């Protein structure tokens, strides 16, 4: 399961191409969903230092949904376990389907989670700011590609369901 994530991080390490794509026009909007206050504040500082706009901080899925409705995010960093339980995956799917948000799951317990269904990448806690920044920049660059990512993933999931007989 960790191989796709290693590829994401290594493909983002070049940085230059991703930075150029992200810095064009307006700053990407990032929603931060984390129930631990110190981690949330660190994430907020990191994202702002990257030159991105933080659309809000939420500690539970209900608050995150409300923030997303008010200001749809380009990227979301979502903890798996929130104040209202293990709701991060369901939230990721909702954000992706509703807004086309590129979602990064940041968790200390990634076992059993897979990329897909709204999850773009999984980052294991504890992570370094540099590693998370690379993944956020890559996610923002993909989102900047417009609705293409959203449409391609939806098409791929549809083909997978048809091929599996679901």
Image (spheres, rainbow, N blue to C red):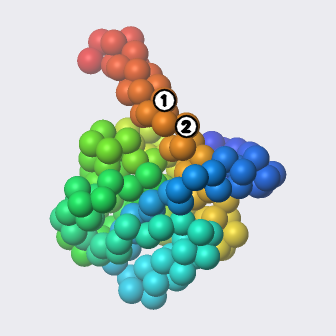
Q: Dot 2 corresponds to which residue?
A: 145
Crowd band around label 2 with a 10 angstrom C-alpha radius: few (<14), some (14–19), many (20+): few
As displayed, is residue 108 above or below residue 104?
Answer: below
From mark 1 to mark 2, how far is it between C-alphas? 6 Å
Q: Quadrant of residue 23?
A: bottom right
| Figure quadrant of residue 97 | top left
Label number found at residue 4: none
Q: Residue at x 61, y 65 (%)?
A: 132
Placement of 32 over or under 71, stated as above or below: below
Residue 123 in the image, given as x and y percentages of width and height: 55, 60
Q: Residue at x 35, y 74 (%)?
A: 57
Using the image as rendered, state which of residue 73 and residue 38 is in the foreground: 73
Q: Residue at x 26, y 64 (%)?
A: 67
| Left or right of 133, for residue 29 | left
Residue at numbered disc 1 = 148
- Check disc 2 and report its element: helix, strand or loop: loop
Residue at x-position 54% and y-position 43%: 144
Q: Position of residue 27 (x, y in %)?
A: 53, 60
- Please tell me how crowded label 1 is: few (under 14), some (14-19), or many (20+) other residues with Cα within 10 Å: few
Q: Residue furthest front?
A: 25
């Amino acid at each position: 399961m960790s191989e796709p994530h290693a590829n994401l991080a290594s493909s983002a390490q070049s940085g230059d191409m991703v930075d150029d794509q992200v810095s064009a026009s307006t700053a990407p909007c990032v929603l931060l969903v984390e129930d631990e206050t110190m981690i949330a504040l660190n994430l907020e500082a990191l994202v702002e230092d990257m030159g991105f706009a933080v659309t809000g901080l939420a500690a539970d899925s209900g608050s995150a949904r409300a923030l997303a409705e008010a200001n749809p995010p380009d990227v979301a960093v979502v903890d798996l376990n929130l104040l209202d339980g293990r709701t991060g995956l369901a939230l990721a799917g909702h954000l992706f389907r509703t807004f086309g948000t590129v979602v990064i799951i940041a968790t200390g317990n990634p076992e059993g989670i897979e990329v897909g269904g709204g999850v773009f990448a999984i980052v294991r806690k504890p992570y370094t700011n540099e590693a998370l920044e690379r993944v956020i920049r890559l996610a923002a660059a993909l989102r900047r590609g417009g609705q293409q990512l959203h449409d391609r993933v939806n098409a791929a999931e549809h083909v997978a369901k048809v091929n599996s007989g679901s």
